[in-house]
Amino acid sequence: MSTPLFNRVAILGIGLIGSSLARALKREGVAKVVVAGDRGDVPARALRLGIVDEATDNLALAVREADLVVLAAPVGATGAVMEIIAPALKPGAIVSDVGSVKKMVVDMIVPHLPAGVHLVPGHPVAGTEKSGPENGFAELFHGRWCILTPPPNTDPLMVEKVAEMWRRAGMLLQIMTPEHHDRVLAITSHLPHLIAYTIVGTAADLEEQLSTEVIKFSAAGFRDFTRIAGSDPVMWRDIFLNNREAVLDILQRFTEDLTALQRAIRWGEGERLEELFTKTRAIRQAVIDARQA
Ligand SMILES: NC(=O)C1=CN([C@@H]2O[C@H](COP(=O)(O)OP(=O)(O)OC[C@H]3O[C@@H](n4cnc5c(N)ncnc54)[C@H](O)[C@@H]3O)[C@@H](O)[C@H]2O)C=CC1
Ligand SMILES: O=C(O)C(=O)Cc1ccc(O)cc1
């Protein structure tokens, strides 16, 4: 086990991602003490799972004396959480997060950030459709990318500490601006989720007989969409509301491409369909190759 990077790490929101991080931090000896802050019965559940050293529903108490605070609740809660914890943050502490959206999250954190507290926003691009501390696992991050979006004059030593934490959890690191992150994720993650939510919603609205058969014969393509459309409703509501511009932009492009396909089918332009499907098959192969590399 390597030397600890932090004495005390507070994870606020000990769900799928927060609990996976807690497990990785303990397993790799990255933090001496991991504290969970959450609400309702979640702190008790995290303690029962044995994945954190301390847990509380008092977020200000959770961050007291923490060297690193990781916000891991749905992104819409960021402002409210910062308001509660700001007065309790230790001078010199680092505030980071795991949110799937970066520009709005930074905008929600900055007004509350006390002088002398560092901000290193992050997004581990790894997850599942499940939620809650029971579904987390330390290996979630292995071989996946983590994107950091530090503001321009952030102390490089603080960025490196957060980067090293994710490296020890098994991740590959990339730094970019929040705006660029949000554009990239709009196409690679947010639009696919929107499409899955739509197609499953459309199927659900079919008349009863047909919608029963959709479930019965779901092996043919539909099943893969239902996994994604089974993702957490609150988390994804917050992602779409907080990456509005980039998602609407890419949705516009998508709608145009869909209309072009509609025309090709209507006018029997088989070669056009085949050309597109050949291109997308190559992309599928490239995605698999990149994962195995
Ligand atoms: N699920 C995924 O695959 C991924 C999610 N993310 C991001 O990670 C964050 C957390 O997502 P998950 O772990 O999947 O969600 P989750 O639903 O499993 O966990 C969220 C936790 O936050 C707590 N919470 C909600 N509001 C709170 C508040 N006001 N104060 C304190 N605790 C609060 C909930 O009780 C819950 O335990 C989100 O921002 C999401 O965008 C990032 C990468 C992947
Ligand atoms: O389960 C899947 O397919 C995902 O796409 C998980 C996921 C959800 C949100 C993120 O910000 C990153 C990864």
Image (spheres, helix red, strand yellow):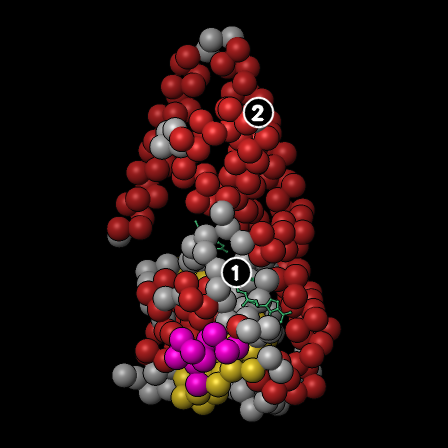
Residue 273: % across, % down: 43, 19
Instruction: Kindly identify the residue that appears in the image at 51 percent across and 29 percent down.
Output: 211
Instruction: Kindly identify the residue that appears in the image at 62 percent across and 82 percent down.
Output: 58
Q: Quadrant of residue 161?
A: bottom left
- Choose between 23 and 92: the one closer to the eye: 23
Instruction: Kindly identify the amino acid type of the residue bearing the numbered disc 2.
Output: Glu
Q: Which quadrant would the N terminus be assigned to in this image? A: bottom left
Q: Which residues are magenta?
A: 43-53
Mark 2 Cα shell of 10 Å, populated few (<14), some (14-19), many (≥20):
few
- Choose between 78 and 281: the one closer to the eye: 78
Q: Which residue is mark 2?
A: 207
- Is residue 203 at least partly visible in the picture? yes
Q: Is residue 284 depicted above or below 265 in this figure?
A: below
Q: Give the main secondary structure, helix, strand or loop, of the magenta stretch.
A: helix
Quote the CA–CA distance across marks 1 and 2.
47 Å
Instruction: Kindly identify the residue that appears in the image at 28 percent across and 45 percent down.
Output: 289
Instruction: Kindly identify the amino acid type of the residue bearing the numbered disc 1.
Output: Met
Mark 1 residue element: loop
